[in-house]
Amino acid sequence: MITNNYFELGFFPTPLHRLNRLSEHYSDYNIYIKRDDQTGLALGGNKTRKLEYLVKDAIDKGCDTLITYGAAQSNHCRQTAAAAAIAGLGCHLLLKGSATPELNGNILLDKLLGANIHWTEQPEGLLTPEELIKRVKLSGKKPYYIPIGGSNEIGSLGYARAVLELKQQLFENILDIDYIIFSSSSGGTHAGLLVGKYLYNLSSEIIGISNGKDEMGKTPLGQQIVDIANKVAALLKFDKLFTLDDVILNSDYNSAGYGVVTRAEVDALHLLAQKEGIILDPVYTGRAFVGLIDCLEKGNFKKGSNILFWHTGGAPANFHYAKQLV
Ligand SMILES: *Cc1c(COP(=O)(O)O)cnc(C)c1O
C-alpha cells in the first residue's frame, strides 16, 4: 500500500480528547479535538503528515535539497525546514514579500533550523519559485520542489492516512463523530481527509472553513480540493471520481482576507485558551474556530451531535501577531 511508504517525522497517533468545559458551555453538543498541533516536528502542525510523504518522495527521487514557498509566517515553511534537517537535506524557503529585519515567530524558527531564506520581492524584480529552482540547480544541487502548503497528491496522502488513525481512535473510544471542522487553505488537508473518508468509510461530514478569499485568475479552493482528491484517488488506485458536490467548504468567515486578524479571531483564541488551555493560531485555526463557534450558536449542527475540531497547529505565529492578540 502506497500509504505505508513514508519517512517518519512526527508523533502519531495525535491525541483525541473531549473539550469538557466547552461542551458544558454549548450543552447541546459534545465537542472533541484532534491534536495535530502536537505532531512534533519543530512545534507541530498539519504539515508534518504531508512532509512524511513528500520527504520520502524526495529521497526516492535522489534529491538533496527541499525548496518550498509560502507567506513570511508560513508554518509549512518552518516545518519543511525541520523535515530537511531530520532527513539531512538542504532547504531553501521562498517567502512572500521583501526582506524584513523581524526575527519572530516562524521566521525565527526557520533560521534556527538552518534554512536558506529568500524573499519574492527583490530590488531587481520578483523572484519566482521557478527561478529559485533554476539557481539551486545551477549551484550543483538536486532540488525537490514542494508546492505551497505541501498541497499536492503526495502530501495529501498524509491526511488520507490520518483518517485511518482517527477511525482506530473512534473504535477504541466507542465514539462516532458527526462533523469534522478544520481550517482549509491550500486544500491538501481537506483533499486528504475527503479521500480518507471514502477509502476508510468514515461517516463524519468533512467541513473545511476557508481562511482566505479566492484570488482572481486562480483556481477556486473548492476546485483545487477536488483536483487534488482525484489525483490522490488515482495514486491509490481508488475508484472514485470526486466533484464539487463532495466538498463542504464554508467561506463565511474569510472576508477580512488571509492573515488579517479581526476581533472574532482574537475572541476565539481567548475562548479556547481560557476554557481548555489550548493555544490556537490567529491565521488558520483561530478563524476555523470562529466558524465552529458561530455554527454552534446558530444551531447549524443537529442537537446532541458529536463535533470534532481538528487542530492543525500554527501557534508560533502568535508571537508575530502578539500586539493584536491582547
Ligand atoms: C497550512 C495550514 C492549514 C491549512 O492546511 P491546507 O492543507 O493548506 O489547507 C491550517 N492550519 C495551519 C496551522 C496551517 O499551517
Image: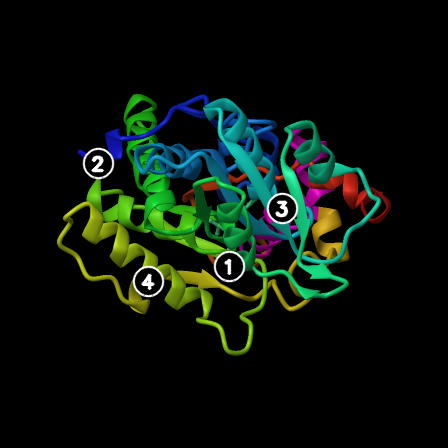
Q: Is residue 237 left or right of residue 98?
A: left
| Residues shaded magenta | 268-296
Residue type, label 3: Ser
Q: Nearer the viewer, residue 293 or 232?
A: 232
**Residue visible at 34% across and 47% down in the picture:** 192
Q: CA distance from mark 2 to mark 4?
A: 20 Å
Q: CA distance from mark 4 to mark 3?
A: 24 Å
- Residue at 42 percent of width and 46 percent of height: 180
Tag 4 residue? 226
Q: Is ligand 1 closer than 8 angstroms to the Cβ of mark 4?
A: no
- The image shows residue 56 at horizontal and vertical percentages of 35, 32
Q: Are marks 4 and 1 in contact (CB under 8 Å)?
A: no
| Dot placed on the residue nearer the N-terminal end, 1 or 3 | 3
Callout 3: helix, strand or loop? loop
Task: Determine the CA span between mark 1 and mark 3.
Answer: 19 Å
Q: Are marks 2 and 3 in contact (CB under 8 Å)?
A: no
**SS assignment for the magenta stretch, majority:** helix
How dense is the environment of label 3, judged by Cα within 10 Å: few (below 14), some, or many (20 and up)? Answer: many
Confirm or reject: label 3 Cβ below 8 Å from ligand 1: yes
Amino acid type for the residue under numbered disc 1? Glu
